[in-house]
Amino acid sequence: MKRLLRLLGSLQIAVPLLIAIAGVLAWGTVYETRFGTSAVQRFIYQSWWFQGLLAFLAVNLAVAALARRPWQRTHAPFLLAHLGIILTLLGGVIGGRFGLEGQLIIPEGQAERALQLPVNVLVVRQPNPGFSHVIPTRFETTAWVHEPRARFQVGLHDRAISLLVDRYYPNALAEEQVSEDGPEENPAVQLLLRHEEQEERVWLFARDPERFGLRWGEAHVLFLEPATRSEWLDVLGLASPETSGRGVVSLHFPELNVQKELPVPDPFPDEPIPIEGTPYAATFKDYFTDFAITAHGVTNRSAQLNNPAVALTLTGPEGSEPFLAFARHPEFEALHGQARRIRAHVTYRMGPSVTLPPNAICLLRHPSGELSCVTTDDAGHRHLARCEAGGRYHHPWLGDGFEIVTHAPRAKRTTQFVNRSDEVRREALHLTAQDGSATAEAWLVRGDAVELSLGNEPLVVEYGPAQRELPVTIKLLDFRKIDYPGTQMASGFESDVELTDPQRGVILLRTIRMNHPLRYRGFSFYQSSYIPGAIDTTVLSVRSDPGTPFVYAGFLIVLAGVVTMFLSRARSPEHPSTPG
């Protein structure tokens, strides 16, 4: 038995094992350079085979120590060093197998307890009847394989769906292609914008609320399609004050399937305005041409129409509820996610002459298909000119040049993906679902969902990080980005959070800073990053590592072994101590 221990603990096994681990670490360095840190963590350092190597090294060290029995006092440094390394390796194995690591992404004012893990899953859902199936994936750990040909069988309540992932791009770039042979009217123009040495090609779509305009330098570039004479007069600045007015409030009641429009009155009436076909009435409270929130509260900064807004109150069976709508920010209401008693969507729009921004390049499409161009200066003065595809024009005040490359009345958009590199940065999958003879395909970007028309009920497929519920809830009360003085470079981030533990009845108020985490019940919450926007969103890294005590103990024991070695040498006859 002793001879076996000596054999297992000899250099004949230890040296090849150490060489193998060193080779894996070198491979991991190269792998990280090509595929990124998150990929090497999942594919190598957290894999079962690498942790098996570490465990085997720990066993080898333990056997080497046992082979020295019976131990003597002079063996103390040797035994302490071996014990410390074994504990460190054991802590790494335990952390890799049983640890938990992920991110909490929390918008300001909201709470979250779903931890996003570094591994990805496919989620297949069918809304009616309710159905959800989670499929673990590991495409990112073999990022060089761009055609995985991975097939999954998803069992529904009455049939099975075959789902094929035939392409995986770890760093995908979406390329939009626009053709002129669409099945229906969809007016679009392609412009070549120029400013000094800078050029950019852009597509604008008149009927797409997210693609009808953009900001390019100081210019606002728009493509509009006025439908009536009054709208043409508005956009040309020829409408009378009675026709332009203060704009229109649109009220949509989804439960009643009713949509009504109310012109913003001037002046406001003393009585509520009944909304025909509904049990509700609207009371207009205030009108702003340039809405702003200052230290002294809500104010109207100027008479210029920079940020038009209207405040009103709806009254009905549920009671009264205030609404605030912005002409240029229709997404404002959805951003705050406020739960309302009165189920109504309130939007506010103004005539194009009112909302046409300064320094604008505005292309107008006539019902006949012809194009005109309206440009404005910084004071809103307009200049009208007729234009056509292939023509080159200049903004008379800014000096920016633009060329109408293409005018497509029936534009059709398709999106193709190409892969830029093997580094895992923006993942995309190409899916093909098959149900008998029916098939459907789509591209799916990480973090998004697509709907596949397959059979009577469509399938919704999502691709994103796996999630796990934490035993606590974290609410972001306030987020602060601290800049270096005189710059916009961040020197640090701070998150004021409220931690709620319903199992133990604990509520904690803490501030999480960089290098100052919040620790609770074995979880550590670190300030990692943030997402800027209308509402700041904090990103907290969460880690739970049960192997950490073993690692710390291992370091301390190794340190004790080093100290013991120096003390034993100082006391030995070969190394006499120097008299004081």
Image (cartoon, rainbow, N blue to C red):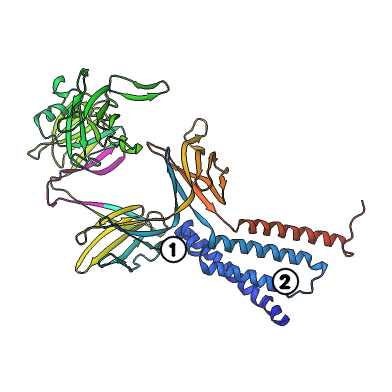
Mark 1–mark 2 CB contact (< 8 Å): no
User: Which label sits on residue 527?
Assistant: none
Q: Kindly identify the residue that appears in the image at 51 percent across and 50 percent down.
A: 542
Q: Nearer the viewer, residue 172 or 138?
A: 138
Is the residue 378 above or below the residue 167 in the image?
A: above
On the question of residue 196 being in view, the answer is: no
Q: Which residue is mark 2?
A: 65
Quarter holding residue 123: bottom left
Residue 291 in picture, x, y percent from top left: 32, 25
Residues in magenta?
A: 176-204
Q: Which residue is mark 1?
A: 141
Relative to 42, is 93 on the left or the right? right
Residue at the left extreme? Answer: 368
Amino acid bearing label 2: Ala
Q: CA distance from mark 1 to mark 2?
A: 37 Å
Q: Nearer the viewer, residue 1 or 304?
A: 1
Amino acid bearing label 1: Thr
Q: Earlier in the sequence, mark 1 or mark 2?
A: 2
